[in-house]
Amino acid sequence: MAGRNIGVAVDFSSCSKAALRWASTNHTSNGDQLILVHVNNSYQNEQGAMHLWEQSGSPLIPLVEFSDPHVTKTYGLSPDKETLEILAQVAHQRGVEVFAKVFYGDPTKKVCEAVDLVPLSCLVIGSRGLSTLKRALMGSVSTYVVNHAACPVTVVKENM
């Protein structure tokens, strides 16, 4: 079943890296495309070209460009070394094409929109493991996405 667009929601936190590691190891195969979905909800980055991508997100950013600090600065990103290493490894060892797509706005809604806009076959997202009370008060991106995304969603706990 090659040739799928597998999405992974990333915010460069430890739980999103756990989801990325899990998806890279357990869910990708030769010929798949791994699409990092990042939502920048900081409106301090609202300048120039970013306004162009507010509705539909950035163009797909290939791994070689995503690894270039000058390019990622254009999108308001700063991926860490560990994330880039995971991506390089999955691209090299599993024959997976890696891209990133950046959205701007509310992470809960934009991650769900990414499913249709890319389009994604499935989505992997990390969970911070909030308690029931904190989830009720603060909300949970992963809970919202599980209930609203138009594709299968896998939630990966950070301590896996």
Image: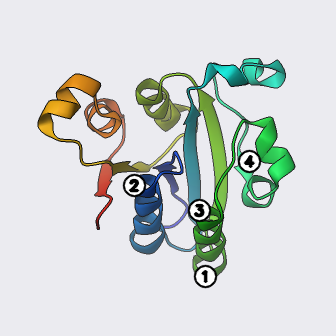
Q: Position of residue 24 (x, y in %)?
A: 48, 68
Which residue is located at x 63 percent, y 71 percent?
Answer: 85
Q: Which residue is mark 2?
A: 15
Q: Amino acid at mark 1?
A: Gln
Residue 99 can be seen, yes or no: yes
Name the amino acid type tagged 3.
Thr
- Badge 3 crowding class, 10 Å Cα cut-off, few under 14, some 14 to 19, many 20 or more, is many
User: Label 1, on which residue?
Assistant: 93
Residue 158: give x, y in percent of width and height: 33, 59
Amino acid bearing label 4: Ile
Q: Earlier in the sequence, mark 3 or mark 2?
A: 2
Mark 3–mark 1 distance (CA, rounded to whole Å) = 15 Å
Tell me how many marks there are. Answer: 4
Residue 1 appearing in the image: no
Q: Secondary structure at mark 1?
A: helix
Residue tagged 3? 83
Image location (x, y in percent) of residue 102: 64, 37
Residue 44 figure quarter: top right
Mark 3 and mark 1 in contact? Answer it, CB < 8 Å: no
Amino acid type at image mark 2: Cys
- The image shows residue 117, relative to residue 83, as above or below, that is above
Q: Label 1 neighbourhood size at 10 Å, few (<14), some (14-19), many (20+)?
A: few
Real-space Cα separation, disc 3 to disc 2, in angstroms: 12 Å
Which sits earlier in the primary sequence, circle 2 or circle 1?
2
Q: Of the residues tagged 2 and 4, which is closer to the observer?
A: 2
Distance (Cα) linking label 4 and label 3: 15 Å
Quadrant for the C terminus, please: bottom left
Which residue is at a point 32% across and 40% down the rendered structure image?
Answer: 142
Q: Secondary structure at mark 4?
A: strand
Query: Mark 4 highlights which residue?
Result: 61
